[in-house]
Amino acid sequence: MCILDILVISWLSKFFKLRHYPLFMYDVIIIGGGAAGLSAAIYSARKNLKTAIISESFGGLISYSSNVENYLGTKAIPGYELSQKFLKHAEEYEIDFKEEKVSELKKIDSSFIVFGQKEYHAKSVIIATGSKPRKLGIPGEKEFSGKGVIYCTTCDGPMFAGLDVAVIGSGNSGLDSVIQLMPIAKHIYLIEAADQLFGDKALQDKILGNSKVTIMTNTKTKEIIGTKEMEKLKVDVNGKEKLLDVQGVSINIGYIPDTSVFHIVQKNERGEIIINNKNETNVPGIFAAGDCSDVPEKQVIIAAGEGAKAAISAFKYLAKN
């Protein structure tokens, strides 16, 4: 390459950068690597769109479920194994995988810039970032995080072997946490603020009557106490304060949408991205799918379907524009 070629390339790079014209632009960038994102990526690639998927990790929250018994075509399968099937399927297509955190999304003229470790340009974007565990917001929670306080029993439950522990929240994730801990923990307190258990009856039936499980309804968690590690849990049972001698707690009180960096799109009071039945946001060219959106039910099979819908809508948008 001669000096003149180098000068021309340098000038062209500056020209395109100054005018927001990237040297390379994707047809679609998908942000998020769970069921919705991977499904969207597969559908986009099959439509012959230049596709990238950007995520801090791939697999999504389903990776942390011990067993999935309600996904079509599989009677029962470990969550991690199902997530890896999703990922392996996506890897069969011409998709650029970027394992990095997205910090911002901007619209420039009729295209978009996704800010990760680099700037990535696209004609359309699908947001499929899912959700993250909700915090209790009580004294001691932050101080003892990782020192007895966990949010993922599948990941960290083995550290509770032989210990007395508490599981907070009786939704499906809380019930699943209890089921995972039954073979390894000494005793488990299932704590629920309401006057009844929630979650699927099939999961409830697995813990009801088990001698290792004490169910505490009408119980509010007040404080996590300890020195170097968690040692006690202060709760309020029907207005009476009580200390539980537990050395660990798994917090399972739901999830919040992981949408804080997306200021460009309209969100509801819960932080969910508002979409229509075509997965369109208020910004033409930006779509959303899965748990980060305001679709009412948060299930892996629904997220996968929503990802497919979003990709089809993105394809139709690109065809028109």
Image (cartoon, rainbow, N blue to C red):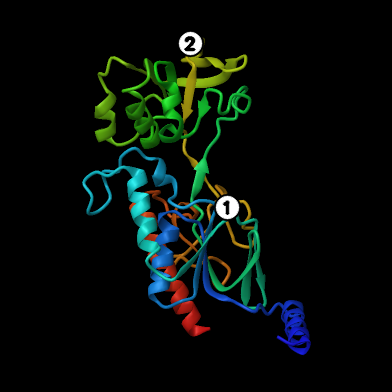
Tag 2 residue = 245
Of residue 272 and residue 122, the one placed in the foreground of this image is 122
Task: Estimate the x, y position of residue 146 in percent, counting from the top left.
Answer: 55, 28
Q: Is residue 204 left or right of residue 63?
A: left
Residue visible at 58% across and 69% down?
A: 283
Foreground disc of the pair 2, 1? 2
Please report whichever mark, 2 or 1, sits nearer to the chain's N-terminal start: 2
Task: Estimate the x, y position of residue 13 in percent, counting from the top left.
Answer: 73, 80
Tag 1 residue = 259
Of residue 290 and residue 4, the one placed in the foreground of this image is 4
> In the rendered view, would you say 57 is above or below 277?
above
> In the rendered view, would you say 205 is above or below 62?
above
User: What number is the disc on residue 301?
Assistant: none
Residue visible at 41% across and 40% down?
A: 64
Badge 1, how many Cα within 10 Å: few under 14, some, many 20+? many
Disc 2 on helix, strand or loop?
loop
